[in-house]
Image (tube, grey):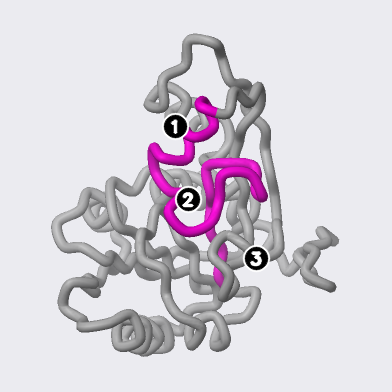
C-alpha cells in the first residue's frame, strides 16, 4: 500500500476527487495519508479532516525564499514516508531538491492540453482566459510527472474537453474540472499505485 501525500493551496476539489476515488475503489493500492497546505485555513484542509486524513500546514509566507521552503517541504515529505506526491491545486513551484529526491514520484494536474497554455504564470483562470482568446475548439487537462521544468515533465494522461462559443473562463474552468481533471487525476494515481507507469526518454508508457 503506497502512501500518497497531497499538496494543496485552496479549495481542494481535486483532493476531493482523489478521496472519492479511494473510497469507491478506483485507487486500491494507495492511501492518502497526509494533506499538506501552503496556506492555513483553506477548505482543502477541512475536506481532509472530514475524511480522517492527517493535515499539515507549511505556510509559504513563513519562509524567506523558495530554497528554504523546499527544504522544509522535503523534510515533511520524508517524515510522512511519501511514495507518491500529488500537486492538487498547489500554487508554489518547489525547487530542484524536491524533484531530485522524488524522481517520477510527483504528479501534477494542469487544466490544459500540454504543451498548450502551460509553464510559469499559467494557472487558475488565466489558462482558460488564454484558451478562449486563442479561439481553440478543444482544451482539456493533463496529468504529468513533475520535473525541474514547470509543466514540462513526462505526460501520464490527457483528456480533451469541448470549448463552446458562449464559454466564459469560469464556465470553461468548471467543465474542464468536471469532465477531465477529476477523472484523469485519480486514474493516474491508481496507475502509479499499481506500478503500471514506466518512464523512458521523457515518455510515459502504461503497462
How many neighbours does mark 3 have within 10 angstroms: few (below 14), some (14-19), or many (20 or more)? many
The residue under label 1 is: 129
Spatial CA span between label 2 and label 3 = 21 Å
Q: Nearer the viewer, residue 167 or 46?
A: 167
Which label lies toward us, 1 or 2?
1
| Helix, strand or loop status at disc 1 | helix
Q: Residue 183 at what x, y percent from top left?
A: 58, 40
| Alpha carbon distance from label 1 to label 2 | 26 Å
Residue 147 point in image, percent of width and height:
59, 72
Chain part drawn in magenta: 106-133
Q: Quarter holding the N terminus? A: bottom right
**Residue at the outermost top position:** 166
In percent of width and height, residue 160 lies at 67, 32
1 or 2: tag closer to the N-terminus? 2
Mark-to-mark CA distance, 3 and 1: 23 Å
The residue wearing badge 2 is: 18
Q: Which residue is mark 3?
A: 153
Q: Earlier in the sequence, mark 3 or mark 1?
A: 1
Residue at 56% x, 14% y is 164
Dot 1 and dot 2 residues touching (CB under 8 Å)? no
What residue is at 41 percent from the left and 26 percent from the top?
169
Residue at (47% x, 16% y) in the render: 167
Residue 80 among magenta residues: no
With respect to residue 94, does 14 lie above or below? above
Helix, strand, or loop for circle 3? Answer: loop
Q: Earlier in the sequence, mark 2 or mark 3?
A: 2
Examine the image and state in which quarter residue 35 appears: bottom left
Please say if 146 is above or below 98: above
Residue 8 appears in which quarter of the rendering? bottom left
Look at the numbered disc 2 and give the secondary structure of its residue: helix
Residue at 39% across / 53% down in the picture? 89
- As for residue 122 lying within the magenta part, the answer is yes
Amino acid at each position: 500500500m503506497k502512501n500518497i501525500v497531497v499538496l494543496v493551496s485552496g479549495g481542494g476539489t481535486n483532493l476531493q476527487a482523489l478521496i472519492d476515488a479511494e473510497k469507491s475503489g478506483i485507487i486500491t493500492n494507495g492511501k492518502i495519508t497526509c494533506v499538506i497546505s501552503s496556506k492555513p485555513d483553506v477548505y482543502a484542509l477541512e475536506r481532509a479532516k472530514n475524511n480522517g486524513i492527517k493535515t499539515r500546514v507549511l505556510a509559504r509566507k513563513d519562509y524567506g525564499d523558495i530554497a528554504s521552503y523546499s527544504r522544509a517541504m522535503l523534510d515533511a515529505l520524508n517524515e510522512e514516508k511519501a511514495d507518491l506526491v500529488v500537486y492538487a491545486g498547489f500554487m508554489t513551484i518547489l525547487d530542484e531538491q524536491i524533484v531530485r529526491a522524488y524522481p517520477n514520484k510527483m504528479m501534477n494536474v494542469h487544466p490544459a492540453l500540454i504543451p498548450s497554455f502551460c509553464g510559469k504564470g499559467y494557472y487558475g483562470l488565466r489558462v482558460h482566459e488564454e484558451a478562449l482568446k486563442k479561439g481553440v475548439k478543444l482544451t482539456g487537462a493533463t496529468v504529468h510527472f513533475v520535473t525541474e521544468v514547470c509543466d514540462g515533465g513526462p505526460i501520464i494522461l490527457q483528456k480533451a474537453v469541448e470549448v463552446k462559443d458562449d464559454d466564459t473562463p469560469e464556465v470553461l474552468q468548471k467543465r474542464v474540472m468536471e469532465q477531465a481533471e477529476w477523472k484523469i487525476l485519480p486514474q493516474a494515481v491508481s496507475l502509479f499505485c499499481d506500478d503500471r507507469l514506466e518512464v523512458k526518454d521523457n515518455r510515459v508508457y502504461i503497462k
